[in-house]
Amino acid sequence: MSPSPDHSAALHPASLHHPAGTAARGPYAVDIDPARAGWAYSALRVLTLRPGGVHSFASGDSEWTVLPLSGACSVRVDGGIFELRGRASVFDGVTDFAYVPRDAHAQIASGAGGRFALAGARCGRRLPARYGPAPEVPVETRGSGDRAREVRNFASADAFDCDRLIAVEVVTPGGHWSSYPPHKHDEHLPGAESVLEEIYYYEVQGPHGLAYQRISPSRPGGADLLAEVRDGDAVLVPDGWHGPSIAQPGHDLYYLNVMAGPGTEREWKIRFHPEYAEGYA
């Protein structure tokens, strides 16, 4: 699998904003694969299991992380079982997770039920199935003041080994801006910027909570979006300056970022919008 470095950036999804329920398919509340997105690599599924529920899936040509959003589960893959303690909600801190390699059959089972995100990426190498312990997830505070947010780097490029997949969680306090300053990763510039397709999946704390997501074009005809996002929504970022993500006062905002691209190196290299040279202030 070796498309040209600009292959991803040349594609453009028909819809950038998928409100809750509109990307549902089969057992998944969200099912965005590369074909549905209109690009080459990144994928996201969100699975809800009732108490005692079991779900089996084939990983196919993609690697996946199974990440509890709420509840606990076991993941059976490659003859082993990973017991994930999970968490009560995404606002209750980091969670453990499991890595499912390509060309595998996996089973997720939950005694008490729960919701689980499957972050995926088409890939070439088959790596071992593994368990990601919660205490080993690097957590950082990014930005300051009303731009401060918590980033949980559970599958960032430098924290957990994958072939192409990069995935992190971000929690933005109510009234704060995150994914800010606006930045992009849609050009191949060695050492400065990498091409990555990105999915945002949102949850908002508290009833009637909402947030706003901005994407502005980095080229003529590029991605352009200002969307009110709510619990269970997803946004696709094929290109463009993305940010800010704005959390409603009184309602913390969570989003899961799923990224992958065609580069020979798995790396997260971004460029800030030229009007915001200070970067993460």
Image (tube, rainbow, N blue to C red):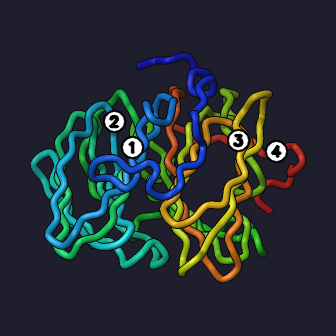
Residue identifier under label 4: 273
Q: Secondary structure at mark 3?
A: strand
Q: Nearer the viewer, residue 3 or 237?
A: 237
Mark 1 and mark 3: Cα distance apart in space: 21 Å
Q: Are marks 3 and 4 in contact (CB under 8 Å)?
A: yes
Q: Secondary structure at mark 2?
A: strand
Q: Secondary structure at mark 4?
A: loop
Q: Amino acid at mark 4?
A: His
Using the rendered image of the protein, determine whether residue 29 is visible from the camera's viewpoint: yes
Mark 2 and mark 3: Cα distance apart in space: 24 Å
Q: Amino acid at mark 2?
A: Ser
Q: Nearer the viewer, residue 131 or 217?
A: 217
Question: Is 13 rendered above or below residue 209?
Answer: above
Q: Residue 13's mark?
A: none
Q: Residue 120's mark?
A: 1
Mark 3 and mark 4: Cα distance apart in space: 8 Å
Residue identifier under label 3: 184
At a point 57% along the width and 27% down the height, the residue shown is 8
Which quarter of the picture shows residue 274? top right
Mark 4 and mark 2: Cα distance apart in space: 32 Å
Residue identifier under label 2: 62
